[in-house]
């Protein structure tokens, strides 16, 4: 593997099933070869309790991790050395996450936002814009509210994902079927309301300003179009043919570099589903068309993924590295950029379940 084909990744992990948080899991450093998809050189870069999601400060020298525990924390690490398995993570402070069971983090230049799944609280921690160091003290917090019709999962708010969309911070609330908006340092209200029982999880912004939100609870991908200063649902399609609510669960969604394909990891069916984003003539809303599913292996329970290479990089295939929580593996998928078909070309065993894949 040469320097030109190597891509460094940070891997967030969960404790082993049945083990307590802080019993050996942490943040791992690995390299993936963008030519053949093989993952190599894994090592534990920092021990941490349930660092299930990671984000890098825009400067690239500070890594943030949530500690997904009942009394959650936001952790910061200085990145020393060049990206790759030789880089070191040095603890650089921690603050409360502002709520329970933080599951997602978004890093900006001056603030780091955290989604707390357990109680639905969104929180914003101040950081030094130059170094990325966390400011002392508790973050600003914003409580969620509401519920949904899926009694077992929607008894109250559950903040699940944070995105920066056109300068606004959007937080998906799985429990209340809404996207909340935060702007100008405060709560700006609801940006979008999804159909009851959607369970909005992760989202991407399309080039025309529309959003695609994947529903964890209804097993559908929803297209939302601009409506004033917010968004309204325009259409929805199953995550893949035969996807059923309560059996198949969306995890993460990404958009190809050219904006024409979506990749959705689906737990239960354990596939990477690929959809074409078609833009009809006449200014009509984008339409999603299912292209193919790539089987990831029974019991894989794909938690998260990252696109690490594409034809824009001069590669023949689009390479996606998937964190398989259920089988404790990183799986590299090579996708045909035209048909969306693909296959797993490499597997890498992890000592504890991987939960997040982040390019270094």
Image (cartoon, rainbow, N blue to C red):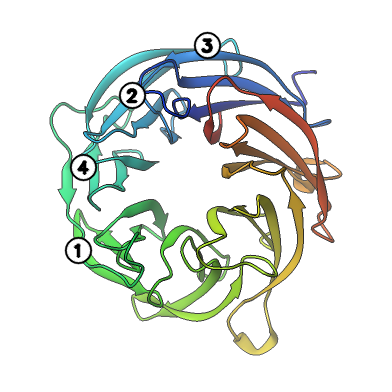
In the image, residue 63 sits, relative to residue 159, either above or below, namely: above
- Above or below, 236 against 357 in this view is below
Up/down of 215 relative to 316, above or below? below
Q: Which dot, 3 or 2, sits closer to the camera? A: 2
The residue depicted at 64 percent of the width and 42 percent of the height is 299
From the image, tell me which residue sits under label 1: 145
Inter-mark Cα distance, 1 to 2:
29 Å
On residue 81, the disc is 3
The label nearer to you, 3 versus 4, is: 4
- Percent position (x, y) of residue 229? 33, 75
Disc 3 from disc 1: Cα separation: 43 Å
Question: Closer to the camera: disc 1 or disc 2?
Answer: 1
- The residue that disc 4 covers is 99
Task: Determine the CA span between mark 1 and mark 4.
Answer: 14 Å
**Among numbered discs 4 and 2, the one appearing first in the sequence:** 2
Q: Alpha-carbon distance for marks 4 and 2?
A: 17 Å
Image coordinates of residue 159 in percent, x first then y, are 31, 53
- Farthest residue to the bottom: give it: 282
Q: Where is residue 131 in the image (x, y as percent from the top left)?
A: 33, 24
């Amino acid at each position: 593997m040469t320097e030109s084909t190597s891509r460094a990744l940070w891997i967030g992990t969960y404790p082993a099933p049945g083990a307590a948080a802080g019993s050996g899991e942490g943040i791992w450093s690995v390299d993936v070869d963008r030519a053949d998809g093989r993952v190599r050189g894994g090592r534990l870069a920092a021990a941490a309790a349930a660092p299930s999601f990671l984000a890098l400060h825009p400067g690239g020298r500070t890594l943030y991790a949530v500690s997904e525990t009942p009394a959650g924390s936001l952790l910061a690490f200085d990145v020393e050395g060049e990206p790759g398995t030789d880089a070191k993570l040095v603890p650089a402070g921690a603050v409360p996450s502002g709520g329970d069971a933080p599951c997602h983090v978004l890093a900006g230049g001056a603030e780091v936002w955290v989604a707390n799944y357990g109680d639905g609280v969104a929180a914003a921690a101040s950081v030094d814009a130059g170094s990325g160091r966390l400011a002392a003290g508790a973050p600003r917090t914003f409580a969620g509210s509401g519920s949904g019709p899926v009694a077992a999962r929607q008894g109250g708010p559950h903040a699940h994902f944070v995105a920066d969309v056109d300068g606004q911070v959007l937080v998906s609330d799985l429990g209340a079927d809404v996207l909340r908006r935060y702007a100008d340092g405060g709560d700006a209200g609801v940006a979008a309301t999804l159909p009851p029982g959607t369970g909005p999880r992760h989202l991407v912004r399309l080039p025309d300003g529309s959003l695609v939100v994947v529903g964890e609870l209804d097993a559908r991908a929803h297209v939302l179009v601009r409506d004033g200063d917010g968004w309204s649902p325009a259409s929805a399609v199953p995550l893949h043919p035969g996807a059923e609510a309560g059996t198949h669960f969306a995890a993460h969604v990404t958009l190809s570099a050219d904006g024409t394909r979506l990749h959705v990891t689906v737990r239960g069916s354990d596939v990477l589903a690929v959809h074409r984003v078609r833009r009809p003539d006449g200014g009509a809303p984008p339409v999603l068309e299912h292209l193919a599913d790539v089987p990831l292996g029974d019991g894989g329970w794909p938690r998260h993924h990252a696109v690490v290479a594409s034809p824009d990089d001069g590669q023949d295939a689009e390479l996606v590295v998937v964190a398989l929580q259920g089988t404790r593996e990183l799986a590299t998928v090579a996708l045909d950029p035209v048909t969306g078909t693909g296959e797993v070309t490499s597997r890498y065993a992890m000592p504890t379940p991987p939960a997040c894949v982040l390019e270094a």
